[in-house]
C-alpha cells in the first residue's frame, strides 16, 4: 500500500554534503520525523529510492556545470515545495569565489588536460535558475532551523527563521562584543542570525556563514573595520568567504578591492 | 568631544596612581579606635562596613538564602554573574569607555567598585533574554495549558548603580502595566544593593538625566566605597527592612559626620566627571516636532540596524513571542525573547515592515526613548547609563544625535512621513 505521508527528497549540486548531513544529524528527532514524512529520495542516507513527485524537496549545492541546469529544472518540476539549504544553494558557496576570478585561466594552470573540464564560469545559487519556495541559509545550516522548516511544512505554516543580525543572539546570550571590547573585526552586524552567535563566544569575529541580514549596512561596517586597522585586501577577503557571491557581501568586497578590469588596469 | 570621556577617565586612573597600594590590615576599620556594633540598624540609618569585613557581608546574604550576582571580569569586560567570594568582584579593575570602544584597565588600588557599568544590565535577571511562558499539550481532542511556574532564586543584586536603580524603576512600571507575573515575582524576590559611583565613565550622563550619580531613596542597601591610603571601607545606608535584616549579623561601625562629608565629596567628584551630557530641556517636543530632520537620514547611513544599543539598554523592554511546536505536533511551547525596533520584522504588518529604512528605525528608537516615553510611562526612557554609546559597534552617540537636532531644528514636517 502506498504511503500517505508526504514525500521528502534531498538532492545535491556543487557542495560538500555538510548541510544534508545536518538532516542525518537530527538523531533524536529522526524517528519522529520518519513517522510523519516519507524519506523518498535521500542518497546520502539510503539507496532505496521512491519515485517522485515529491512534496518537499531540499536542494543543497550551487550550479557550476552546464548539466546542472536541466537537472535542476527536472527536480523543480517534480517538487511541490522546494527549499534550498546552505550557503552553496542560497548564495553560490565558497566556490562562488570563481565569480571573482578567471576560471579558464585556473583550468589551464591546474589541469594537465583542461579540455576535459566542462564547467561554468560562475557558481550561482539555485534561485538564479528556478523558483525557490524557501531559502535556509548557513554554512552549514542549523539543525534547529532545518527541523523548524520541516515542522512548519508539516504544520502548514511559514517557518520562523529570523532575518535579523547575529548581534541579536550574541547579546541575548550575554557575550562580550569582540568589536567593542577587543577591537576584533566581526561580520555579525551585517550577517543573518541562525548559528547562535557561536564565534564571538569564542572570542572570534563572525565569519558571515549565514549571509547578509535583511538590513545589511556593509559600507558602514567596512568603515569601522578600516578604523580597526584592516587594509583593503583583508577587507575584501573578509567578505569573500562562504557567501562571497551574496549581493550585499559581493558589493562590499568589490568596494574594498574592485575586481580587476579585463584590460588589467 | 569623542575623546573627552576617555581622557577624564585616564585622569582618575593617573590620580589614583599616586596612592600607594595599601596593605589590607591598615585598611581595617578596627584601627580606627571606634568599636563595631552587631545590632540591626533601622531603615534610613548609616553605618560603616570595613573592607576586611566584606566577606562577612557576602556570607550574611548567602545565609539569608540570596543568590548574589554582581560585577565580575569575563572576556575583557565587567559583566554581571554569580559572586560567591569577594575575589569574584573586579578588585582593582576599571575600564575606559568611549563611543564604540571599551577596554579594561588596571587601577592602582584595590577598589571593589572602581568602574561603572558594562555590557550587561540587571534586566537579564528580571526580564531574561529567553523565557518560556507556557506549554500546551494535546490530550485527545482537547489540549492542556501549563503556565510556566514563576518560582526561582531570590537574587541579591550587588553593585546597582544610581542609573540602574532608575532603570529598574522604569521597567517596574512597564511590566506592571503589562501585568507580567514572571517579572513581578522575580522583582519582589530581589534585593538591590546599590553602589554610589566613585567616578563616572566616558559615556555616562546620569547627571543630565537626573538619575545619578547619587543613589535615590529606592534601594535596600546603598554603599559608598571610601578608599584612601589610610582606609578602605564602605558607608552603608539602610533603605529597607530587608536590607536592615542583612546587616544584623555584620560588624558595623557608627558613621561620623566626616564619613558623610567624604561620601558627599565622592558623589560631587563623580557628578563633575561625566563623560557625556545631554540637554533635555523641552526634548519631548523637540523630537516629536522633528520627524523630517535631515539628521535622521545621516544617522541612518551610519547605523548597522544591528540592535546592540537596544539589547544593552537597561530600559528597553521590546520582546517577541513565538510558539515552538515539537515535530509530532503534540506539544507546543510559547517562548518570549528580547526583540528590537531595529529589526525589520519588528514592524512587520501584512508581510512587510512599516519601518523599512534604518533611519526610520533609529528615529523610532530615539524618539520613543527620549520623547514619547514621557507620554506613555511618565518619565524619560533613558537613564543616561551610556551603554548604547559604548556598545554601538560604529559608535553612534545618542547625546550627539540630540545635540545635532537641537542645534538646527528643522521645520516640522507631516507626521505621516514614516519611511
Ligand atoms: S561580537 Fe560581533 S556579533 Fe557579537 S555583538 Fe559584537 S559585532 Fe555583533
Ligand atoms: S538609551 Fe542609552 S544611555 Fe539611555 S538608558 Fe538606554 S542604553 Fe543607557
Ligand atoms: S551613569 Fe551615573 S550612575 Fe550610571 S554608572 Fe555612570 S556615573 Fe554611575
Ligand atoms: S545605533 Fe549602533 S548599536 Fe544601534 S542599531 Fe545602529 S549601529 Fe547598531
Image: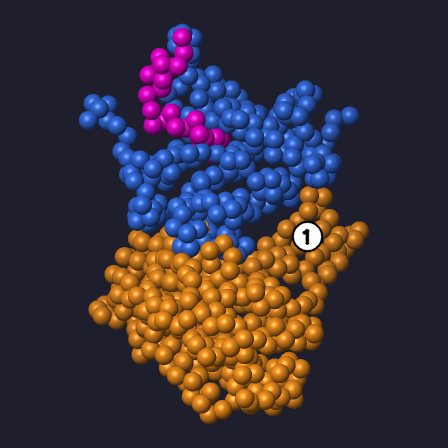
Chain colours: A blue, B orange
- Seen at 26% across and 71% down, the residue is B406
Q: Is residue A203 magenta?
A: no
Residue A213 placement, left or right of B57: left
Give the camera-side residue of B167 and B239. B239
Residues in magenta? Answer: A88-112
- Seen at 30% across and 58% down, the residue is B299
Residue extending furthest right? B140
Residue named by callout 1: B332
Residue B302 placement, left or right of B321: left
- Seen at 34% across and 27% down, the residue is A100
Question: Which SS type dominates the magenta stretch?
Answer: helix
Q: Picture coordinates of residue A116 (x, y %)?
A: 43, 8
Q: Chain of mark 1?
A: B
For the residue labelled by badge 1, is the local secondary structure a helix, a strand or a loop? strand
Q: Picture coordinates of residue B199 (x, y %)?
A: 40, 73
| Figure label count | 1
Give the camera-side residue of B250 and A230. B250
Quarter holding the C terminus of chain B is: bottom left
Q: Is residue B125 visible?
A: no
Quarter holding the N terminus of chain B is: bottom left
Q: Picture coordinates of residue B184 (x, y %)?
A: 62, 73
Residue A131, compared with residue B391, is above or below; it is: above
Q: Is residue A93 magenta?
A: yes
Query: Label 1 neighbourhood size at 10 Å, few (<14), some (14-19), many (20+)?
Result: some
Q: Is residue B198 visible?
A: yes
Q: Picture coordinates of residue B301 (x, y %)?
A: 30, 53
Residue B74, compared with residue B16, is above or below; it is: above
- Seen at 75% across and 58% down, the residue is B144
Residue A9 placement, left or right of B235: right
Amino acid at each position: 500500500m502506498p504511503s500517505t505521508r508526504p514525500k521528502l527528497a534531498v538532492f545535491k549540486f556543487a557542495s560538500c554534503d555538510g548541510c544534508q548531513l545536518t538532516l542525518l544529524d537530527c538523531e533524536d528527532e529522526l524517528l519522529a520525523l520518519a513517522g510523519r514524512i516519507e524519506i523518498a529520495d535521500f542518497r546520502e542516507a539510503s539507496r532505496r529510492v521512491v519515485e517522485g513527485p515529491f512534496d518537499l524537496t531540499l536542494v543543497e549545492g550551487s550550479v557550476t556545470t552546464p548539466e546542472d541546469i536541466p537537472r535542476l529544472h527536472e527536480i523543480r518540476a517534480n517538487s511541490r515545495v522546494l527549499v534550498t539549504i546552505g550557503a552553496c544553494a542560497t548564495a553560490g558557496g565558497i566556490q562562488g569565489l570563481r565569480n571573482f576570478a578567471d576560471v579558464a585561466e585556473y583550468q589551464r594552470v591546474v589541469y594537465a588536460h583542461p579540455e576535459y573540464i566542462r564547467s561554468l564560469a560562475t557558481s550561482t545559487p539555485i534561485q538564479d535558475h528556478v523558483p525557490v519556495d524557501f531559502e535556509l541559509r548557513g554554512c552549514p545550516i542549523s539543525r534547529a532551523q532545518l527541523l523548524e522548516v520541516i515542522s512548519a511544512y508539516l504544520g502548514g505554516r511559514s517557518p520562523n527563521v529570523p532575518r535579523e543580525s547575529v548581534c541579536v543572539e550574541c547579546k541575548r546570550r550575554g557575550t562580550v562584543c569582540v568589536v567593542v571590547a577587543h577591537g576584533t573585526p566581526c561580520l555579525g552586524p551585517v550577517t543573518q542570525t541562525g548559528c547562535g552567535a557561536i564565534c564571538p563566544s569564542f572570542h572570534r569575529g563572525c565569519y558571515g556563514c549565514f549571509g547578509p541580514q535583511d538590513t545589511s549596512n556593509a559600507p558602514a561596517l567596512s568603515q569601522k573595520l578600516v578604523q580597526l586597522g584592516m587594509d583593503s585586501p583583508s577587507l575584501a577577503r573578509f567578505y569573500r568567504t562562504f557567501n562571497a557571491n551574496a549581493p550585499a557581501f559581493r558589493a562590499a568586497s568589490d568596494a574594498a578591492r574592485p575586481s580587476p578590469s579585463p584590460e588589467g588596469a | 568631544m569623542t575623546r573627552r570621556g576617555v581622557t577624564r577617565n585616564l585622569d582618575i586612573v593617573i590620580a589614583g596612581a599616586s596612592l600607594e597600594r595599601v596593605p589590607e590590615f591598615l585598611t581595617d576599620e578596627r584601627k580606627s579606635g571606634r568599636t563595631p556594633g552587631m545590632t540591626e540598624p533601622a531603615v534610613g540609618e548609616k553605618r560603616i562596613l570595613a573592607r576586611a569585613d566584606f566577606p562577612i557581608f557576602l556570607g550574611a546574604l548567602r545565609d539569608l538564602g540570596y543568590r548574589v550576582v554582581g560585577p565580575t571580569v569575563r572576556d575583557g569586560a565587567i559583566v554581571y554573574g554569580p559572586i560567591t567570594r569577594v575575589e569574584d568582584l573586579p578588585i582593582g579593575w576599571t575600564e575606559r569607555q568611549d563611543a564604540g570602544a571599551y577596554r579594561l584597565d588596571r587601577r592602582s588600588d584595590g577598589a571593589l567598585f572602581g568602574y561603572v557599568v558594562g555590557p550587561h544590565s540587571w534586566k537579564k535577571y528580571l526580564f531574561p533574554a529567553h523565557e518560556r511562558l507556557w506549554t500546551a499539550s494535546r490530550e485527545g481532542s482537547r489540549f492542556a495549558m501549563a503556565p510556566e511556574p514563576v518560582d526561582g532564586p531570590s537574587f541579591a543584586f550587588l553593585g546597582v548603580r544610581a542609573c540602574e536603580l532608575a532603570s529598574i524603576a522604569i521597567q517596574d512600571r512597564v511590566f506592571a502595566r503589562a501585568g507580567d507575573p514572571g517579572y513581578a515575582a522575580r522583582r519582589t524576590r530581589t534585593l538591590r544593593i546599590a553602589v554610589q559611583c566613585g567616578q563616572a565613565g566616558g559615556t555616562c550622563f546620569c547627571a543630565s538625566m537626573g538619575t545619578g550619580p547619587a543613589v535615590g531613596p529606592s534601594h535596600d542597601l546603598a554603599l559608598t566605597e571610601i578608599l584612601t591610603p589610610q582606609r578602605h571601607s564602605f558607608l552603608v545606608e539602610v533603605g529597607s527592612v530587608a536590607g536592615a535584616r542583612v546587616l544584623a549579623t555584620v560588624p558595623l561601625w557608627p558613621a561620623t559626620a566626616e564619613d558623610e562629608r567624604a561620601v558627599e565629596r565622592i558623589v560631587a567628584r563623580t557628578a563633575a566627571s561625566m563623560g557625556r551630557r545631554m540637554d533635555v530641556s523641552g526634548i519631548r517636543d523637540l523630537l516629536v516636532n522633528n520627524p523630517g530632520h535631515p539628521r535622521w537620514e545621516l544617522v541612518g547611513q551610519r547605523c548597522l540596524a544591528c540592535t546592540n544599543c537596544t539589547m544593552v539598554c537597561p530600559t528597553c523592554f521590546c520582546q517577541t513571542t513565538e510558539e515552538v511546536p515539537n515535530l509530532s505536533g503534540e506539544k507546543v511551547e510559547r517562548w518570549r525573547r528580547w526583540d528590537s525596533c531595529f529589526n525589520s520584522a519588528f514592524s512587520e504588518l501584512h508581510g512587510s515592515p512599516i519601518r523599512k529604512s534604518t533611519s526610520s528605525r533609529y528615529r523610532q528608537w530615539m524618539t520613543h526613548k527620549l520623547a514619547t516615553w514621557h507620554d506613555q510611562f511618565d518619565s524619560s526612557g533613558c537613564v543616561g547609563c551610556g551603554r548604547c554609546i559604548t556598545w554601538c559597534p560604529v559608535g553612534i552617540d545618542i547625546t550627539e544625535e540630540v545635540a545635532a537636532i537641537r542645534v538646527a531644528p528643522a521645520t516640522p514636517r507631516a507626521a505621516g512621513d514614516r519611511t
